Amino acid sequence: MKFIGFLAVLAGMAIAGAAAAGPNLIVNGDFSAGDTGFTTDYDFITNPGSTSLEPEGTITIADNPFSVHPYWVDLGNTNNPMLIVNGATSGSPTIWEETNISVGAGKTYSFSATVMDICCNSTYGANANAPSEIKFQISTDGGADWTDLAGYTTKPGAVAQSGDSGIPVTIYGSFHSAVLGQLAIRAINGVSAAGGNDFALDNISLSTPEPAAWALMLVGMGALGGALRARRGINAAAI
């Protein structure tokens, strides 16, 4: 009976965890719909080929960095589209931006995104490999002012295929909306180097817990309490 109670606890908590987040408010956050749902200041390359992203300041959507640049990491056929970026060498252009995201008053929103250094493969050798300083920012006044939400600075190694190259990293942030309104989110890069400074973005998400999730969590906690009470009863009977 104790084992069954333990399974009930696990099941209740798993259900609560799975339902903890509401719908993703980011349109096409996984880039599976292609070049839709966002704007960019970069040059977007459609139908990219093996050398399409050699110029700095260009982006595209593909499932393997190596398929669009001969020096970048080869992830194979992942069937996982991502936004692939050759970092710009001047200014601070917006890489990705979504506007008109509706937020409610008095709600806290959770943000997450996957970032990945993609420079370089073994053919790049020991050439200069600059990091990228990726920042996601929010604006509540139509883009007049921006506040940092989450960020990551890549850690390229001294030689190719070292450091964090080819390793996806999930970053997190949160935002409390005091009033009902519209939100904008953008991604920028604080580095303007030509060697290295190449990365990918994916799985951009903004959501808030839903009331049903809290109910399911209470079910899980109730199962936990019931299992503990049953255990105490068994122990008392054994004395």
Image (spheres, helix red, strand yellow):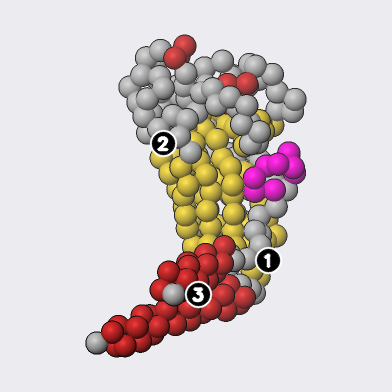
What residue span does the magenta drawing correspond to? 28-36
Is residue 185 one of those drawn in magenta? no
Going by the numbered disc 3, the residue's amino acid type is Gly
> Which residue is the extreme one toward the front?
238
Residue drawn at 40 percent across, 19 percent down: 160
Residue under numbered circle 2: 154
Sequence-earlier tag: 1 or 3? 1
In the displayed structure, 199 sits above or below 55; it is below
Work out how far the residue at label 2 is from the one at label 3, CA to CA, in angstroms: 39 Å
Q: Which residue matches tag 1?
A: 102
Element at badge 1?
strand
x then y, percent, for residue 36: 75, 44
Which quarter of the figure has residue 60? top right
Q: Which labelled disc corresponds to residue 82? A: none
Residue of label 3? 220
Give coordinates of residue 103: x percent, y percent. Answer: 64, 68
Give the residue displayed 55% in from the left and 26% down from the top: 75
